[in-house]
Image (tube, rainbow, N blue to C red):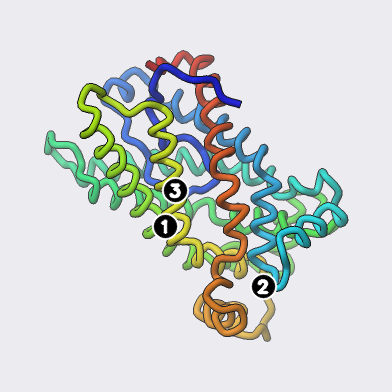
Amino acid sequence: MFVIICFEIPHMKYLDIGEDMNVPDDFTQSEMQTGMWWRHLAAGGVAGAVSRTCTAPLDRLKVFLQVQPSKQKIGDCFNYMLKEGGVQGLWRGNGINVLKIAPESAIKFAAYEQIKRLIKGDSKVGLSIYERFCAGALAGGISQTVIYPLEVMKTRLALRKTGQYKSIMDAAFKIYHFEGLSSFYRGYIPNILGIIPYAGIDLAVYETLKKKYLKTHSNLEQPSFWMLLACGSTSSTLGQMCSYPLALVRTRLQAQVAHPSADPATVTMTGVFRTILQKEGVWGLYRGITPNFIKVLPAVSISYVVYEYSSRLLGVNMT
């Protein structure tokens, strides 16, 4: 799939792995003034759309495993998806997953830049890792709050049976009509709480690995692409491991159909946590993490290739 690339990618953190909680990269003053920033974002958006589409079956498999009892195995879930919806059914929920890339990226970028200005003030010193984390976490929280109804719909569409919804709009109308507006924010609290460990660990590990590499290679200004790929994949994987239980609880809450007489154990964050620990144990909080890890490398790889090609078409200097 790869050819060896002899230049360095300027914004490695804009490569998409299907997760939306990472802290954005900082653009240089020159990139902001020349308008290169929007070209990087556009290239990242295209790369994300292609990457998510290529790895959509793994993402849907993850969602299925997250909401199924612990006895269900990966092979059983995959066979069910094939029998129930055919090969095409493996991509259910991908349309809205791609659709939300543009608004989420735009909101996160705008919020991140504004929060950075507020933190920095008149100081000419760059932001510390801690300040970047705070700005990124707040920006992520803002973007997730705005687009969260799309997250709920993505889960519902991924889990839907054949013929249940005719389209994205039909799904939105039926959820609103039968469950009310509040259903579009089911699982919101664990989702927001998950931003903190994911963004913090992802940023800290990524920057630490990159700096340690540069200390041992003082002749380089930036690590090679392969090193950045390793740093990004490692930091993202560790971030996912720490925040995954919250992501799983979020998905189970999103999948639950609202009902006035519903058992609190199935409709509250603490109730779902308690039920999983009692019935499935600690490992129950990590159901579905295997396909989630499997998709990291192909997602980053595909994203990089498309990002490079899109950047060249948009006139972005990759050197």
The disc, 3 or 2, on the residue closer to the chain's N-terminal end is: 2
Instruction: Give the amino acid type for the residue marked by disc 2 in the picture.
Output: Ser
Question: Is residue 257 at least partly visible in the picture?
Answer: no
Q: Is residue 226 left or right of residue 126?
A: right
Q: Which residue is mark 2?
A: 70
Residue 215 at what x, y percent from top left?
Answer: 21, 34
Query: For the point 57% across and 58% down, which residue is it?
Result: 289
Query: For the point 56% across and 78% down, which residue is it?
Result: 281
Question: Is residue 22 at least partly visible in the picture?
Answer: yes
- How crowded is the residue under tag 2: few (<14 C-alpha within 10 Å), some, or many (20+)? some
Query: For the point 54% across and 40% down, which residue is it?
Result: 297
Q: Element type at marker 1?
A: helix
Q: Which residue is mark 3?
A: 236
- How crowded is the residue under tag 1: few (<14 C-alpha within 10 Å), some, or many (20+)? many
Q: Nearer the viewer, residue 244 or 184?
A: 244
Q: Which residue is mark 1?
A: 195
Between circles 2 and 1, the one closer to the viewer is: 2
Instruction: Give the amino acid type for the residue marked by disc 3 in the picture.
Output: Ser
Disc 3 from disc 1: Cα separation: 12 Å
Above or below: residue 134 compared with residue 33: below
Instruction: Give the amino acid type for the residue marked by disc 1 in the picture.
Output: Ile
Disc 2 from disc 1: Cα separation: 26 Å
